[in-house]
Image (cartoon, rainbow, N blue to C red):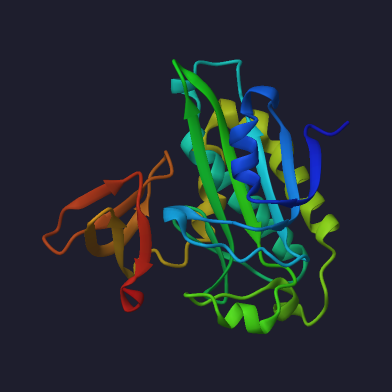
Amino acid sequence: MKRYRLKEFAELESTNLHALANLHDLADGDVIQALVQTAGHGRLNRRWISHVPGNLCVSLVLKPAHRAPADLPLASLSQLLALSVCRALDAHGTPATLKWPNDVLVSGNKIAGLLAETVTRNGFVGLVLGLGVNLNLDPELIASIDQPATSLAACIGNPVDVTRFRDAVLADFFTRYDEFLSSGFPMIRSEYLVRCSFIGSDIGVRRGEETLRGRAHGITADGALEVLTPDGDVRTLELGEMFLADHL
């Protein structure tokens, strides 16, 4: 029996927006999928190209209720999902890496992004975890993206079955979901670090108007990024947008 329940739509403005608007009527493990999004977006409200079919656009509704929300590894659930995407890409012969905290790259080009949105109204209501994966995005649209990007079809030279890819990602995530809620990021830290090719590289991390520059030093037991600054201090960052120094 599946741990999740799929709700499919031909078109939505955004799977995250739909999930957030209907959060009280959705249960833990509900997954919203749209074949097309008319207003897909990522972090910092950046546009996510998803107005054409053939790519994966889903939002996972997570409402873990068996522990106090403050004790749950909510911030790291997107990292678990990113690893599930990496595993599905590996199965297609396409090794993937991570850009902290949860961007998925192939040969340095972004292929998947995640957007986590937590809802609190007099307490924790739920977490909506949005995922977009470029599976069959055509080269012209890839070229229009404002950062190096790719699609799985471009990597393997063949069309990708969206349903099979989706099922592989969701099965992997929800197989580990309950254990992860109990164990937290340490459960996946070793696997996550293997994917972090940026460790030891010069980076910048944008946080609002501030950009912290330094060297990627490591990943903590909670999934935070450690940055070695030029003055020799190690700063621990739980939020931010990381870039390699030559992309700043």
Relative to 46, say whether 83 is above or below: above
Residue at point 31% right, 52% down? 226
Indicate whether 198 appears above or below 206: below
Q: Is residue 60 above or below residue 85?
A: above
As displayed, is residue 232 above or below residue 93? Answer: above
**What percent of the width, then of the height, locates residue 155?**
70, 79
Report the label total: 0
Percent coordinates x, y for residue 138 in the rendering: 71, 79
Say which quarter of the image contains residue 188: top right
Q: Is residue 54 left or right of residue 197?
A: right
Closer to the camera, 127 or 168? 127
Percent of width and height locating residue 232: 14, 58
* Left/right of residue 53 with respect to residue 222 in the rendered view: right
The image quarter containing residue 170 is top right
Residue 20 locus on image (x, y percent): 59, 35
Name which residue lies at 55% across and 79% down.
Answer: 144
The residue lying at 77 percent from left, 34 percent from top is 4
Q: Residue furthest left?
A: 231
* Residue pictured at 58% horizontal, 28% vertical: 181
**Closer to the camera in the image, 190 or 170:** 170
Answer left or right for 207 relative to 195: left
Quarter of the image where the C terminus is located: bottom left
Residue found at the very far right of the displayed protein = 1
The image quadrant where one finds the N terminus is top right
